Amino acid sequence: MTEQRQIPFSPPDITQAEIDEVVDTLRSGWITTGPKTKRLENELASFIGAGKVACLNSATAALECGLRLLGVGPGDEVITSAYTYTASASAICHVGATPVLCDVAPGSFEMDYDALSRLVTDNTRAVIPVDIAGRMVDYDRVREAVGDVPVLADGAHSLGARRHGQNSGQAADLTAFSFHAVKNFTTAEGGALTWRRGFLDDEEAYRRVMLMALHGQNKDALAKTRAGAWEYDIAFPGWKCNMTDIQAALGLVQLERYPHLLARRREIVERYEAGLADAGVTLLKHFEGDADAGGFASSAHLMLVRLNDRDRAFRDALIERLALAGVATNVHYKPLPMLTAYRDLGFDIADFPNACAQFENEITLPLHTLLTDGDVDYVIEQFRRCKTELER
């Protein structure tokens, strides 16, 4: 009998190098937004192929700042997916706009592009597609569906992904990233906003985001340390969502390691695909063809698995059995219309049958770079065993 292991769902991959960089920051005497945050922004821009990156304290803040850059506010409508985490829609509410939810296509985790086109009205000011699990959506189809409506990508999962010759951060007009503790690339908490070259004036857009992130103040703490530079102004009553140098220190080392981390995630995905090929499941495809031509390469953030011809009760029972076997799993996501906040806004899951069907039999298996090949094999073995036992 196989010895039981304990497989966590998504722990951060932190090495001594990240620890040393954080300690260096603590000893430097500069721990809030400062030189390391600015350096991380520059290095992320180079990695993505963007003109500018603005680091913030979350992807949610990045989405909100992106909407505010677009001038979205009360009376405006913003379309996003019914199959996503609340942040994609809550940012719309934060700016006073009205969220409009789009169902996913049958058998897909991406918005139904035909349905998306029918949701566009004269009041539509933006659309927020969601790169779920790290796979970029088809931005060509999105643009066909929405015309000239600005596209703000929820790229929380997709840093390092590529599709049709474009990196995540290049395909949409603006893109928000998450660097939360469970993400491929982490700063513990954190996020960033970027925009495609030529869509906005880089320096002016960056200046505006920095004002939003620090109370509308025209000088950050670093600028005010220069001799005689204490004077400042408040341009408008802003918010407080800046990234700190402690967080950026983590990110600087994570970015150095990121190509290797992405490659390891691909290996794990391929191991899952081989081990579950005949297990009666459908896996979200992370890699297809040439990402520089018509294909795509995901960042492989989540291992989304659908249990063919099974229901929610079966899925939930399987989660419990896997937990007893030491394997932590999750579900991504409970569609927004099933949540109290969005039901209170008038949404009904009956109007989103495809999102409901995706959710009913979805289970997310561990996918992180602390997994050994033996760990992945153990998850596959226990998944198949527990599933078979439930089917008897």
Image (spheres, rainbow, N blue to C red):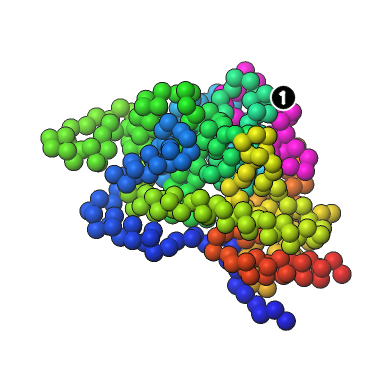
Residue 120 part of the magenta segment: yes
Q: Which residue is mark 1?
A: 118
Quadrant position of the C terminus in the picture:
bottom right
Residue 166 part of the magenta segment: no
Q: How many marks?
A: 1
Q: Position of residue 32 (x, y in %)?
A: 30, 48
Q: Position of residue 109 (x, y in %)?
A: 70, 43
Q: Residue at horizontal 48%, vertical 38%? A: 48
Q: Residue at horizontal 65%, vertical 51%? A: 332
**Does residue 360 appear anywhere in the picture?**
yes
Most foreground residue, 47 or 212: 47
Q: Can you say whether 44 is above or below 276 in the image?
A: above
In the image as oriented, which residue stretches furthest toward the left? 228
Q: Residue at horizontal 43%, vertical 63%? A: 15
Q: Residue at horizontal 48%, vertical 60%? A: 13
In the image, 39: left or right of 104? left
Q: Residues within 10 Å of mark 1 (few under 14, many from 20)?
A: few
Q: Position of residue 202 (x, y in %)?
A: 40, 27
Q: Which residues are magenta?
A: 100-129
Q: Can you say whether 122 is above or below 62 in the image?
A: above
The quarter holding residue 65 reads: top left
Most foreground residue, 23 or 270: 270
